[in-house]
Image (cartoon, rainbow, N blue to C red):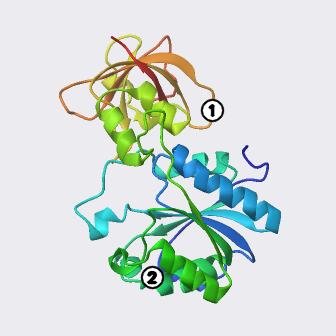
Amino acid sequence: MTAREEPLRCWRLTLDELLGRAPLFARSAVAVGNFDGVHKGHLRILRMAVERGAAAGETPVALTFHPHPRAVVGSGAPPALTAPEERERALGAAGIAAVVTLRFDEAVAALEPERFVRDVLVGGLGARRVVVGENFRFGRGARGTVDLLRQVGEELGLAVHVVETVRDDRGRVVSSTLVRQLLAEGDVAQAAALLGRFYCVIGRMLDGDEQDGGGAWRVQPSAGLLLPAPGKYDVLAGPPGGPSVPAAVEIPADGEGWLRLFGAEAPAAPGEEVRVQFIARRE
C-alpha cells in the first residue's frame, strides 16, 4: 500500500460545519477510528477502506476525532502518539485520499448511534462503505456496537466491514495503549515494530539564547505528545516533511518536558518545527 499521487485533502470540522457542507463526497469508503499512532492495527483497517473503495469507485476517507473522546466523556485524554498534522501525514501515506477530523465535543458525544451513522457517515461523508475494528463503539454512551452498525447499515444501503484485531509476534493486541506502554519503558525499537515506522515527536527548536552548549539544542515538544522514558536515544532529526540527519537526544529525568538534541549542526532554525524520529535507546 503506497501513498496516493493526489494531494491529501484534510478537513477539521465541528459537527455543525460538517452537516452544513454535507455531503463532502459523492461516494466514499470511510475508515473510522481515533488512529492515534496509526499503528499496524489501524493500517489493516485503512488498507481495507483503500482497497475496497478503489474497487467500487469510492473515495477512501479516514474519519477521526480531536480531542480524544476520553477528554470529553472519560477520565481524561491519554498522551497523544501523534500530533494532528503528523497523523494526517501517516494516514495519507497509508493511501487515504482525505482525512476528516471531527471535533469531539458535547454535541458529538450526545449523538445517538443511529444518528451518527445516518447523519455523519452517510449524510455528511457520503459513505457507501464503512470499515471499523472489531472493538469499535460509537454514539451516545458508547452504545453503538458493530452489530448495530451492521443493522443500520443494511437499512441505509451501507456496506459494513469489521476488521479483526492484529496481534504481534508475542500474541499481544497491537493497540495505542501497548505502544504507550513500550514508550514509557523506553523501548522505542519495539514501539517502532508495532507502528511500522519510527516513533516521532514534533517540536520547536528554541532560540539561540536557550541553546545548551555547542552542538546541543533544546527542543520543546508539541503539547500533549508522549515522550519516551528519560534517557539517551539515537534519532533522526529534520523539518517535518523534509530531509533528516542522524543525531542523538537526551530526555532529562527532571520532568520539564523538553528534549536535548545533539548533532553536528542544528536540523532546523530557532523557532522552526523539527521532527525527531526515535531509532534506539542507548545503553
**Which structural element holds mark 1?**
loop
The percent position of residue 159, horizontal first and vertical second, equals 67, 75
Report the residue at 75% width, 49% height from top: 4
Q: Which of marks 2 and 1 is in front?
A: 2
Does residue 98 show up? yes
Report the residue at 51% width, 25% height from top: 237
**Which structural element holds mark 2?**
helix
Report the residue at 45% width, 25% height from top: 189
- Residue 105's image quarter? bottom left
User: Which residue ends up furthest to the bottom in the rendered image?
Assistant: 155
Report the residue at 43% width, 33% height from top: 170
- Residue 211's image quarter? top left
Query: Which mark, residue 113?
Result: 2
Query: Which mark, residue 57?
Result: none
Side (left or right) of 156 relative to 69: right
2 or 1: tag closer to the N-terminus:
2
Vertical side of 210 occupied by 54: above or below: below
The percent position of residue 186, horizontal first and vertical second, equals 33, 27
Query: How far apart are the alpha carbons under marks 2 and 1?
Result: 41 Å
- The kind of residue on which mark 2 rests is Pro
The percent position of residue 124, horizontal first and vertical second, equals 60, 80
Give the residue number, with chain letter if any, for mark 1.
242
User: Which residue ends up furthest to the left in the rendered image?
Assistant: 254
